[in-house]
């Protein structure tokens, strides 16, 4: 059966074409994820020998996907959620504009394609920075989930300690792929107990604790967990730890024979088809339920819906009129205000 024939059964084929094209072009997708502010962007900067290629910091930084790959630094492609694309002349200002979170970020940008002339990873690799998880911006989590489904290898970052929300996120990742490398970031931070940088024994203890948490959560052998540390600042001057991560990525890419890649793509395509068939089955059940309902009961439900809608609109109108009236009332002086010292301010429910 050809891919196009699946459309006759109501199955969308864009994702399937993407997986097949990735296989044909020998493209390896490495996705860096973790909770927001876990050090994802800084890790990528370290791997690519750059202090400021991607915005990084202690607050939420990356609101879009940023895909980096080997290429001439001529232009950056901005991709939108509706499929549109725009091109801008390559500059760090453009990366900063879209890849650093601020209140005025465009809401319809999905990703940036950023070529790197000095690319220390294998040429087939496309490494992708993500907004991360456990964020107040739920659309950022959706973007992260979207790209994880396309990944060949996940690099999961965490700031010294793996929490319960990390475990939940990793559980979801494992539904897509078991190829996960764990990177403990901020290994060169100041130890609050000693006032000095973490020693090697401190780092080893933190790594062992994280390994134990992962083993307990996923019932796996400690030797099956690939876990390594990296520093926030030293990584740019001392290449020892970043080079270990690069070596791990290179080994993974080199281990992916043509047959392994075919099996992995086949599994992803099967998951895509299974998910869409499940969605179609749910739609069919809804249609069958609606078709089997007594017409009088169905009409009553429809009329009830419109009554509730009408009541909600009336309530909204009354609330709006009341609000306008209150706004037109002259303000009271602070001396007469209930919001003086010691008063309790409550939002109306």
Image (spheres, rainbow, N blue to C red):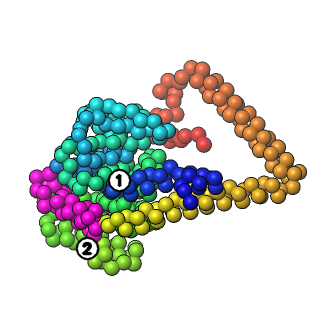
Q: Quadrant of the N terminus?
A: bottom right
- Position of residue 182 relative to residue 318, above or below, is below
Residue at screen point 59% across, 55% down: 6
Mark count: 2
Residue at screen point 53% across, 55% down: 3
Q: Where is residue 327 in the image (x, y as percent from the top left)?
A: 58, 24
- Position of residue 35 relative to residue 262, above or below, is above
| 106, 48: nearer the viewer | 48
Q: Where is residue 47 in the image (x, y as percent from the top left)?
A: 21, 53
Badge 2 marks a residue whose secondary structure is: helix
| Distance (Cα) linking label 1 and label 2 | 39 Å
Residue 101 left/right relative to 44: right
- Magenta residues (range): 226-255
Q: Residue furthest front?
A: 1
| 30, 321: nearer the viewer | 30
Badge 1 marks a residue whose secondary structure is: loop
Task: State whether the magenta stretch is mostly helix, strand or loop.
Answer: helix
Residue 54 left/right relative to 279: left
Residue at which label 2 appears: 208
Q: Does 238 appear in magenta?
A: yes
Q: Is residue 78 visible?
A: yes
Q: Where is residue 61 in the image (x, y as percent from the top left)?
A: 32, 44
Q: Which residue lies furthest to the right in this view?
A: 296
Q: In which quarter of the image is the C terminus?
A: top right
Residue at which label 1 appears: 25
Judge the density around disc 2: few (<14), some (14-19), many (≥20) Cα neighbours within 10 Å.
some
Residue 340 left/right relative to 282: left
Judge the density around disc 1: few (<14), some (14-19), many (≥20) Cα neighbours within 10 Å.
few
Residue at screen point 78% across, 54% down: 290
Q: Position of residue 238 (x, y in %)?
A: 11, 56
Residue at screen point 53% across, 24% down: 332
Q: Does 265 appear in magenta?
A: no
């Amino acid at each position: 059966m050809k891919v196009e024939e699946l459309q006759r059964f109501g199955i969308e084929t864009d994702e399937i074409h993407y997986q097949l094209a990735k296989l044909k072009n020998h493209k390896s997708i490495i996705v860096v994820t973790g909770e927001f502010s876990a050090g994802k962007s800084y890790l990528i900067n370290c791997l690519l020998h750059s202090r400021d290629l991607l915005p990084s910091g202690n607050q939420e930084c990356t609101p879009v996907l940023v895909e980096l790959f080997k290429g001439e630094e001529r232009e950056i492609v901005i991709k939108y959620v509706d499929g549109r694309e725009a091109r801008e002349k390559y500059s760090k200002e453009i990366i900063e504009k879209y890849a650093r979170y601020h209140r005025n970020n465009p809401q319809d940008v999905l990703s940036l394609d950023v070529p790197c002339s000095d690319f220390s990873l294998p040429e087939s690799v496309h490494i992708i920075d993500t907004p991360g998880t456990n964020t107040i911006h739920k659309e950022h989590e959706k973007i992260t989930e979207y790209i994880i489904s396309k990944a060949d290898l996940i690099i999961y970052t965490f700031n010294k300690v793996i929490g319960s929300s990390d475990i939940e996120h990793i559980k979801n990742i494992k539904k897509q792929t078991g190829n996960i490398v764990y990177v403990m970031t901020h290994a060169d931070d100041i130890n609050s107990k000693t006032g000095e940088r973490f020693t090697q024994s401190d780092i080893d203890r933190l790594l062992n604790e994280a390994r134990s948490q992962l083993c307990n959560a996923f019932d796996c052998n400690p030797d099956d967990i690939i876990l390594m540390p990296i520093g926030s600042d030293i990584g740019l001057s001392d290449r020892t730890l970043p080079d270990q991560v690069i070596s791990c990525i290179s080994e993974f890419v080199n281990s992916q024979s043509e047959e392994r890649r075919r099996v992995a793509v086949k599994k992803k395509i099967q998951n895509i088809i299974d998910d869409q068939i499940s969605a179609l089955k749910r739609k069919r059940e809804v249609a069958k339920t609606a078709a089997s309902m007594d017409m009088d009961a169905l009409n009553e439900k429809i009329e009830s819906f419109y009554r509730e809608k009408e009541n909600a609109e009336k309530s909204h109108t009354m609330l709006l009129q009341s609000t306008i009236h209150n706004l037109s009332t002259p303000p009271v002086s602070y001396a007469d205000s209930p919001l003086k010292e010691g008063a309790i301010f409550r939002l109306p429910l």
